[in-house]
Amino acid sequence: MPGPKNLDPASSPRALLGAELRVARERAGLTQAELAERLYVSGSFIGQLEAGTRRMLPDVARQIDEVLRTDGFFARNCAAAATSKYPNHFAEAAEAEAAAKTIREYAPLALPGMLQVEPYAREVFRAYQPTATEEVIDELVRNRLHRAQLLSDPATPLLWCVLDEAVLRRVVGSREIMSEALRHITALIRAHRIIVQVLPFSAGAHSSMGGTLKLMTFEDAAPLAYVQGNAIGVLLDDPATVTRHSLTYDLLTASALSATRSLALIESMAEGYAHDEHA
């Protein structure tokens, strides 16, 4: 039987590579769990590779070729699946985001990237990279706004965000920019496209004081958790770890204002910023 053909990088490399992995695994008579055991990874990780929600890195590809006897196919083709317009620490999370059915995110410091308007995103990237050229900043902003296009679908993904009150009160760029950014969010809420809750300062200590948290579920793959620091991000697939982070998010929503009260607060602050700007 002829082996698999090399993948076309112009197509959907991760999805095609995942489909070929499923075929090769089944041809070898292995379950996802059995292949995972031989690769010293989790069964859910194999499922995510096959579903195209995780990228296949070169060391994993080489191991797969060895175990499944695929004559170097996955090592040759994983480079096409690994290319990304996003920074290395966020690339896998961004790719998973695009395939997610639901996304739940806690933002302690800045508005989530998918909810940022252009001037807000530009101010954030300029703060991160004060000496970068305008061309570099322009590219970063374009890529961030491209992620927001996921919300052009009226139903998928379901996006549920918990915003720390500090996110609303920290003035990024100017009060005019803050007003525009918050009005954008309230428009999405009123269009029933996203769910947003605000975690008020009055909540005191809470379950995610360690930093940002993103949880993603998928139609045909196990859920993922993503935690991020300064230029560092880790995508987690261990079921027990993901379950623990899910509880963290549930506790956050329990401490946060209701969606209705949150909308009222965000709208009030957007108007306040606009009024101050024109006073």
Image (tube, helix red, strand yellow):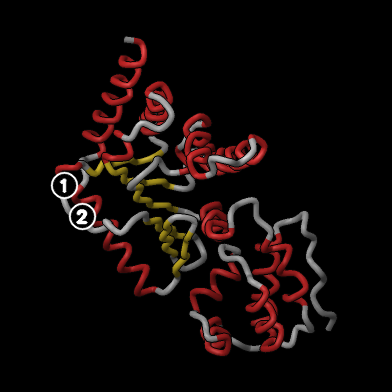
Residue 238 image point, x, y percent: 42, 74
The residue under the point 71% across, 83% down is: 65
Q: Residue at x 31, y 43 (%)?
A: 163
Quarter of the image where one finds residue 138? top right
Residue tagged 1: 203
Q: Secondary structure at mark 2?
A: loop
Residue 91 drawn at (x, y percent):
57, 57
Q: Is residue 24 left or right of residue 149?
A: right
Q: What amino acid does circle 2 point to?
A: His
- Secondary structure under the numbered disc 1 in the rendered image: helix
Q: Give the percent coordinates (x, y) of residue 271.
A: 31, 19
- The one nearer the camera, 18 or 74, is 74
* Left or right: 136 as drawn, with respect to 36: right
Q: Residue at x 69, y 63 (%)?
A: 81
* Amino acid type of the residue tagged 1 in the rendering: Ala
- Mark sitting on residue 206: 2
